[in-house]
Amino acid sequence: MTVPSPESWHPEEGSGSPPYGNFTDAGDGARTARGGTDEHAGGRRSIGRVSRVAVAAGTLTAVCLAMATITYFAYRIGRVAGAESERRRMRLKEGAIQAPPLGVPAAPGVASGTAGRDGATDGNAGPAGISTADRFVMPPDGIWCFGPEESVRAVWPMEIVEADGDCDRPHFRIRQGANALCTRGTGLCEFAFATARHSYVSVWVRVRYSDDCGNSLQASVNGGSPAVVGNRKVYDRWLWEPAHRLFACPPGLHRLTIGTSEDGLLFDRVAIVPMDEGFPLKGEEHLDALRITPPPEFERLPSAGPRLPAIGRLWAGAFAPDSLVIGSGHRNTILLAVRLNGSGSAEGRARVSGRAVAGGVIEKSFRLDAARRTAFIRWDLRLRPRSGYFQPVLVTVEAGGETICSQELNFIRPLPWAFLGPFRDEEGRGLRAELPPDWIVARLHELPAVEGAAWKIVEDGSCYDWMGVVDLNRVFGFPNERWRDEGAPGRVPMVAYAVTCILGMPEDHHNVLAFAGDDAVRVWRNGEMILDCPVNSPLETKRQIVGVPMRGGKNFFVFKVPQTDYYWSLLFEPETNIPYGRQERFEPLQVRLWKGTLRMPFPFSLLEADEE
């Protein structure tokens, strides 16, 4: 169809509009809309643009809402379908696990049978003449139950104890405060167990907690990622606690590692339960009724990581189950655990030695066989401290012409202390409290009289707890208990001062020392402040390693330690195990020698004569 141009379109009045609008010739070549001006035309064009933008925005909004709705329903449908698929997969897996075994062994070298603690098995253990090194004896119900005597390896501060005031049978113990002396999580014990087929196992530990700062452990299998064990807030009674996930175990030999997490707890049983046995529906009573099962024999358990080295047929480890401090009120003992993991028998000798050991060397013998696979050897020591803060005692175990174990335990020579206080801190200002000793801190070692307080001198080590931490509650006659929450009458925040002196090398030198305080601590060395730690937290979380310039001769240390509740303690280690931290010569200086000028070289024979 031919459309006439606007120039040739001249409709009559009221005859309608041309197809492209009403135009007239303006005479100068510019076209204007009939019946309007240029301004009116521009306004209509602006309104049109706004309308188009509004329509586009509305369309985009509708599309976005539609896409969001579609995405939401797709997510919901996918989630439901995924959950159902996971449930089907788990049902299939559980069905496969719980299926009864076939009439042939599921794994070569695994036999079924019962075994008592003496190692004797019943007739289902396999043909005669096949050693247990080639066949693992499985418990009748598939559940392994171990005690400390079945442990194939243990590392301090996870220590084996024959009996103590808290438990009258062998058990594992992580003593309160042990984490202050080591990196958290370094202590562990290990057990060997076997599975006859691919299984998922749950791990249970019978524990006794002391408080909410010591109610968890860790468990791992074959060096895998650890799972938390426990964390219930039930204290001062025995209960079974599970690991918070299952462990997949193919057929064969495995190693279970129970690691430390918090300190201040005991445990005496570990159970490994295949889930195809229908547990844990049977309850804790079922676990309490379990008999101890001997672990499978092995000649070598392969390494499972940097902290989990290979374990041989014979293992030995030494612990100090009583006190590490040499002094009044402290008992120094060493307990050696020797375990035969392989077949046959083993015999050998164990000895302790060191400069501080009365007599120099003490030796004992042992013999292990199938009837007695674990031996506990105990030494009650008489230690005479020599030069140095740490007094090393070497434990050596030899069997079959080889050294099975060579382990050093460091006992602690106590420092002489002078204590001043306690001062009442009604406002709870702690280290910020301005007290009279702060004004004369540079001469506190002279034990000046301070109004409202008296000096207490302790030189026999009785102010220390078992691990070498000064217990200020013991010094001032307060119990280690929570008193603020219980509203104990007359108890308010307090501050105390502690002074000690050590004798270094003849010339000025630099040394690396360790400090910590609970609740907080401020330290001066010869009147100069070297450390200010106002953080109120447990002692084990704030052990400070500090490089300190030392003066030749006497060096006086003053500690200001506030107390708000519960433990009140002070840690000072004038020697550390950090490289270059040990001095060539170190002596704690008795209080009677603090005053006056000390000329070097100092007559060390005077101190050694007091030690004899």
Image (tube, rainbow, N blue to C red):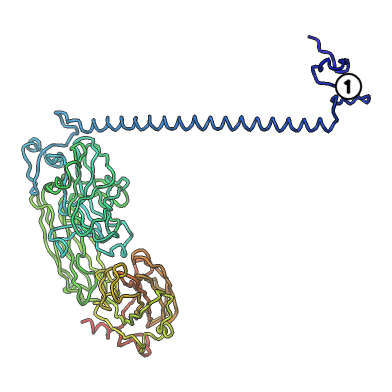
Q: Quadrant of residue 222?
A: top left
In the figure, residue 551 lies in which quadrant? Answer: bottom left
Q: Where is residue 392 in the image (x, y as percent from the top left)?
A: 25, 69
Q: Position of residue 395 (x, y in %)?
A: 20, 64
Q: Which of 78 and 26 is in front in this view?
A: 26
Residue 104 appears left or right of 533: left
Where 123 falls versus 236 (above or below)?
A: above
Q: Residue at (18%, 71%) from the top-left corner?
A: 331
Q: Name the residue under label 1.
A: 24
Numbered circles on residues, count: 1
Q: Residue furthest top?
A: 1
When the figure is inspected, residue 598 is found, relative to residue 540, above or below; the finding is: below
Q: Residue at x 20, y 73 (%)?
A: 330
| Closer to us: 409 or 270 | 270
Corner quadrant of residue 74 = top left
Quarter in which the C terminus is drawn: bottom left
Helix, strand or loop at label 1? It is strand
The quarter in which the N terminus is drawn is top right
Q: Is residue 237 left or right of residue 546?
A: left
Query: Quick check: 10 above or below 554?
Result: above
* Amino acid on which the number 1 mark rests in the picture: Thr
Q: Which residue lies furthest to the right in this view?
A: 27
Q: Which of 75 and 602 is in front in this view?
A: 75
User: In the image shown, does 297 or 216 lie closer to the viewer?
Assistant: 216
Q: Specify the farthest residue to the front.
A: 14
Q: Can residue 264 be seen in this view?
A: yes
User: Which x, y percent locates residue 142?
Assistant: 16, 40
Work out whether 380 lies above or below 7: below
Determine crowd level at label 1: few under 14, some 14-19, many 20+ residues with C-alpha closer than 10 A: some
Q: Can residue 342 be seen in this view?
A: no
* Residue 457 placement (x, y as % from top left): 28, 83
